[in-house]
Amino acid sequence: MELYIDTANIEDIREIAHWGILSGATTNPTLLSRESGDYDQIICEICDLVGGPVSAEVMSDDAEGMVEEAKRLVGLHENVVIKVPMLPEGLRAARELSKLEIKTNVTLVFSANQALLAARAGATYVSPFVGRLDDIGHDSNAVLTEIVEVFSVNEFSTKVIAASIRNPMHVTQAALLGCDIATIPPAIFRSMVKHPLTDKGIASFKKDWEDAQSRA
Ligand code: G3P
């Protein structure tokens, strides 16, 4: 499973990109609204930092407007992928954009049938939101399992991005269930890398080494 970073914060992306484990990034209007500066410039900088697909969302209500926005956004950088909402107009836009060979990420997906529609519209990626499903008492694992299975038995090339990741277990589950990608907030990456036994082990190795050096 590939790992994307789910933020528009340049400092966080720079830090995690240095670990050498990122394949891409996803943004959304809320994430961008938390940053200051020119949004186009932020998107370009993220593209350069991650060196892979970077989702940027369109905000028009109709397919025509979404396609126009998409044409402008893909002009910013070759890594830009267009996020369109899971709506009839978003599906129409995904279909038009696939004809233009512009990559799309259908976002705000909460069911296998929505994912099926997005795949049939020619989406490059679908983004089921696991955290928001769990928030309302639904079983996000069941939904991910269905989507992965539907795509597998139908031999769809559309990739599944587990999004709205809220804790490290969401990442493990997405990997176990066969998602292609998980898009992960910076704080969750920091939780994933830590383990108290790792810290304890490093401290004791260091102490034993230093003791041996002082005896030599
Ligand atoms: O990638 C979508 C994600 O940003 C949504 O996350 O935490 O707002 O549900 P959240």
Image (cartoon, rainbow, N blue to C red):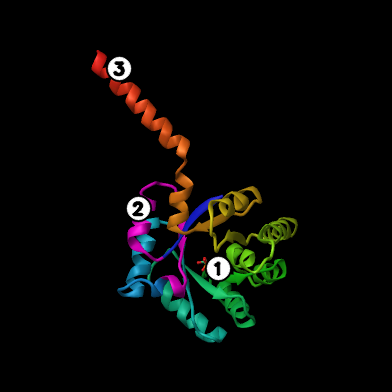
What amino acid is labelled 3 in the image?
A: Ala
Most distant residue in the right direction? 153
> Is residue 26 a member of the stretch shown in magenta?
yes
Quarter of the image with the C terminus in it: top left
Disc 3 designates what residue?
Answer: 212
- The number of callouts visible is 3
Name the secondary structure under disc 3.
helix
Name the secondary structure under disc 1.
strand
The answer to whether the residue bearing label 3 lies less than 8 angstroms from the nearest atom of ligand 1 is no
Residue 23, can we see it?
no
Residue depicted at 65% across the width and 70% down the height: 118
Q: Position of residue 101 (x, y in %)?
A: 53, 69
Disc 2 designates what residue?
Answer: 15
- Look at the image and give the residue range highlighted in magenta: 8-31
Task: Find residue 39 and report its image quarter.
Answer: bottom left
Residue 133, can we see it?
yes
What amino acid is labelled 1 in the image?
A: Asn
Disc 2 and disc 1 in contact, CB within 8 angstroms: no
Q: Position of residue 108 (x, y in %)?
A: 59, 72
What amino acid is labelled 2 in the image?
A: Glu
Mark pair 3, 2: CA separation: 34 Å
Q: Reading the chain from its start, which is encountered first: label 3 or label 2?
A: 2
Using the image, determine if residue 64 lies above or below residue 136.
Answer: below
Mark pair 2, 1: CA separation: 25 Å
Disc 1 designates what residue?
Answer: 105
Using the image, determine if residue 3 lies above or below residue 108.
Answer: above
Residue depicted at 56% across the width and 52% down the height: 171
Q: Position of residue 107 (x, y in %)?
A: 57, 70
Who is closer to the viewer here, 140 or 41? 140
The answer to whether the residue bearing label 2 lies less than 8 angstroms from the nearest atom of ligand 1 is no
Closer to the camera: disc 3 or disc 1?
3
